[in-house]
Every structure is written in C-alpha cells, then in structure tokens.
Image (tube, helix red, strand yellow):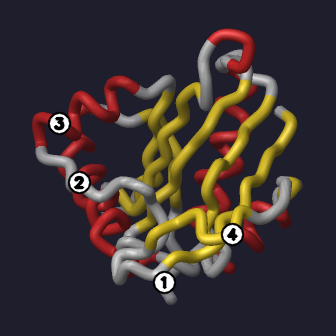
Amino acid sequence: MLKMSILIREYKTSDLLSMIGIWNEVVEDGIAFPQEDLLDENGGGEFFAFQTYCAVAEDTDSGQILGLYILHPNNVGRCSHICNASFAVLKTERGRHIGEKLVSDCLEKGGQAGFKILQFNAVVASNIHARRLYEKLGFVQLGTIPNGFRMKDGKFEDICPYYHIL
C-alpha cells in the first residue's frame, strides 16, 4: 500500500464531479445510504450546496478526491442543535484510514458550526468497519432498530443509531 498525504478540506465546485461519483458509488451498492436515486451534475451541485458543511479527502500528491462527508442539521427547531452526517470513501481507497480522518474532521466542524451533538440515525448493523470506527472515536450506540434498513436486494437489516457529544 502506497503512503499518501491526505488533506481534509472544504469542498470546491471543481470537486463536484468526483464527489458525485463517490456518493453514487455508495448509493449504487445499496447497503449503507438510505438514498435510492443517484445524483446527477445539476442535482448533485444543489445537494452538496444545501448542506451546512461538506468536506473532501484529497490526496495531495495526485489531487484525487478519495472521500467526502456532508454535515447538516438532524432536525429543526428545538432539536436543531443536533447534527447528522454521511461519509463516503472510494471503494478502492477503503482501509487506509481516510474515513477516520473524515469523521474526526466532521466532529470538529460540527462543534464549530454550533451543533452540540452528532447523531447517526441509521448505521446498518452489518457495516462493521463503520461501527468499529465510530466506537473507537467515542460514539455511543443508542440501541438497535430491527429491520430498519432495506438493502438493495430487498432484505431488511437492523440499524444502530449512534451519537457523540461535540
């Protein structure tokens, strides 16, 4: 495995095509994100612009975008101090601790944005790598929701909500 220098930074419009590709790769897998519709260039630009904050993981040697996250309120009004986030890393780059860098940055940026808690509503129970990472970084599992996620193949799987105080 080649050593690379990864920079986590706020996204730029020039990153959008890479971000859309990475996002769609996870959506197409149908085992982690609740979305079923792929982003196109127009809708993707609007989707990412609508978030409170978006960051990318850039390989500083090649300039390639290897992953991303989105951060936004989890709810409105009296619960608007709780944020939610989603993370995606290119399949070919998983296992290189890029996700850990993205989640760590998100925890920092969430607090800077004034959020008090980061909550994940629907971590699929079989997503062991994500669950281990979240627990390593201090997230607390709230329980298990039986059959809370419909996989791409139509089977249902449990989800595990998590939270982290910022």
Disc 3 residue type? Gly
- Is disc 2 in contact with disc 1, using a CB cutoff of under 8 Å? no
- Is disc 1 in contact with disc 4, using a CB cutoff of under 8 Å? no
Determine the residue positioned at 75% across, 26% down: 111
Q: Counting residues from the N terminus, which is met first, the one under dot 2 or under dot 3?
A: 2
Which of the 4 image quarters holds residue 76? top right
Tell which tag, 2 or 3, sits nearer the viewer: 2
Disc 1 residue type? Leu
Disc 1 crowd, CA 10 A, few/some/many (<14, 14-19, 20+): few
Q: Quadrant of the C terminus?
A: top right
Tell which tag, 4 or 2, sits nearer the viewer: 4
Measured Cα–Cα span from mark 1 to mark 4: 40 Å
- Is disc 4 in contact with disc 2, using a CB cutoff of under 8 Å? no
Disc 2 crowd, CA 10 A, few/some/many (<14, 14-19, 20+): few
Of residues 13 and 133, which is closer to you in this image?
A: 133
Percent coordinates x, y for residue 145 in the rendering = 71, 62
Measured Cα–Cα span from mark 3 to mark 1: 34 Å
Does 1 appear above or below 133? Answer: below
Disc 2 residue type? Asp
Measured Cα–Cα span from mark 4 to mark 2: 24 Å
Mark 4 highlights which residue?
146
- Is disc 3 in contact with disc 4, using a CB cutoff of under 8 Å? no
Mark 3 highlights which residue?
43
Mark 2 highlights which residue?
37
Determine the residue positioned at 17% across, 36% down: 43
Q: Is residue 155 left or right of residue 131?
A: left
Measured Cα–Cα span from mark 2 to mark 3: 11 Å
Mark 1 highlights which residue?
2
Q: Is residue 64 visible?
A: no
